[in-house]
Image (cartoon, grey):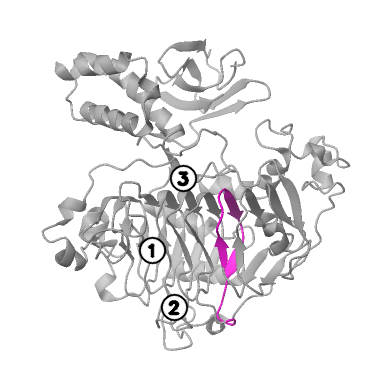
Amino acid sequence: MTRIADFRTFRTASFLFLLPAKRYFLLVVQLFRKYLTGLIISNEQRVIIRFLHIALFLFSTVLVYGQTVNLPAFPGAEGFGKYATGGRGGAVIYVTTMDDHSSPGSLRYAVALTGARIVLFKVSGTIKLKSALKITNGNLTIAGQTAPGDGICIRDYPVEVSADNVVIRFIRFRMGDETQQENDALWGRNHKNILIDHCSVSWSTDECSSFYDNENFTMQWCIVSESLRNSVHGKGAHGYGGIWGGKNASFHHNLLAGHDSRNPRFCGSRYSNNAAAELVDFRNNVIYNWGSNTTYGAEGGNYNMVNNYYKAGPATSSSSKFRILQPYADDGTNSQKAGIYGKFYVSGNYVSGSSAVSNDNWQGVSLHSSFGSYAAGVTKNDIKAETAFLFATVTTHDAPVAYENVLAYAGTSLKRDTVDRRIIHDTRTGTATFMTGGNGSSNGIIDTQSAVGGWPELKSADAPLDTDADGMPDTWEDAKGLNKNSASDAQLKTVDGEYPNVEVYINSLVSGIIENQNKGGVITFASGLTKSKNQAELFYNHSSGELNIHHENAIENVQIYSLTGSVMKAIHGGGSKQLKIRLGELPDGIYLVRIQDEQNKVFSAKVVK
């Protein structure tokens, strides 16, 4: 009875939602665990469930993401970085040349500007960088899908994200070895609110793409392939996929292919010395044709490894063929003491060729020898989490479905070049088109881009006419009832009531890809609750103050709750599959929506007004 009394006191405290985030989080998790383990008296469960529902939805909006905005960067943006705003509301900057210089019209010029900006392209082709391209001014969106023709590739030098609030979509980063750079093709660390979407990264001389020690980060639907092994790195053979990690970092629906190791390497808290803050969600990725190792590291932090697909290839060593994960214990040579190790929730991963490991993922987890040296006595049971750690919303597929969707839609898939098409072909067929790597490597692990044909030609096309240079073609503005002679309507929200008009146009270019890539998945919430994709869709129109609800079944009842559990509105659906509910009279804030359909199924969602 003490537990119930404590809960009642906690529930009725007027300062409940004013508690520091960390204390509030711990109390919510403690109550949730008590409920799941049956430690709460049954006649109180109804009250507690209401509280938990409210609390967990609040966390998925406020605490997990660390922000209170509710509009994703674009439709299809998911994970911890989904609420990056990039260049929203800023100037539209056109790239009109593939030359690399600091004058207007170049990508380097657009990146170097300050203030919010949306970078669009009037040409396609390959940009031969003359030096590293370092993004130091944030509030930036680079929308590669706007390039007419075959799209954009960046080569010869690395691109570094060294700013906050950056969104990059549909760009190829293929550095190569011709300028003898020892670096990643695309990388960044120690920043926040970053989203990398549908990019293709290859031909690096260190890791292909490393992102760690960032906060609120997502890399999604990317192809990371063919790092160069025996190339120009001072330490000798490399050929690594990436070092990944961060404080609230999501890596989902990516393809890693043709790397000797680091597929990826989890950074852990080696440099941050803050294991409690390291939180990584790694799900629905496809890993193909690794050499010596798959995923490893993670010296500190919490990790979800869910529904990934591992497929060995011609280069894969027999010792790692069925390996999902090899955790390390810290050796103490960086910023934290020796012996620190991570904890892992490992579930639903598929290992091609091993039904045993696919059915019991922990058979594919093997502790590195560093545990014997620095964490003696620690076993797999000590690093195993029985339930998932908190994570941001991601549409999650079963591993075999994720495999098909990633092969169909990952990378710069609006128009794939010959490199990505070859990588997809090899992954699907379990082969390597090029068995000789150029400097001693083999079986699909390469040493130089010249061994696989080098950079393909990317042809341009005529850009659509944009009279007012507001980022929206004249024909599109005409079709949407906008003014093609005035740029003032670019940042208005008159087309869909939610996104600025220019973003609606940019997003429309890839809407088919976004819609199709998520088919067959479930939307998985931070609380661990799921709902089937497209069973209930909610859209709040800020302009009209209306909440639009679309359901595949007839709607019987809708209740809208405040965060204190009060019913603010109750509507009878009358059997309709579509409802519009006015919320204009309600104060701004977070509301919980409960929908009951004709089959007595109940769905819940959160709305930020």
Q: Which residue is mark 2?
A: 444
| Horizontal relation, residue 508 to residue 206: left or right | right
Label 2: element kind:
loop
* Vertical order, 121 against 184 (above or below): above
Residue 86 rendering spot, x and y as whole percentages: 61, 47
Residue 521 shows in this picture: no
474 or 219, which is in the foreground?
219
Q: Which residue is mark 1?
A: 264
| Horizontal relation, residue 524 to residue 91: left or right | left
* Vertical order, 234 against 30 (above or below): below
* Vertical order, 388 against 166 (above or below): above
Residue 31 rendering spot, x and y as whole percentages: 25, 27
Tag 1: amino acid: Pro
Membership of 481 in magenta stretch: no
On residue 49, which mark appears? Answer: none
197 or 309, which is in the foreground?
197
Q: Which residue is mark 3?
A: 79
Segment tinted magenta in the rendering? 159-179
Residue 387 rendering spot, x and y as whole percentages: 26, 41
* Vertical order, 171 against 495 (above or below): below
CA separation in Å, label 1 and label 2: 18 Å
| Horizontal relation, residue 176 to residue 284: left or right | right
Nearer to us of marks 1 and 2 is 1
Tag 3: amino acid: Gly
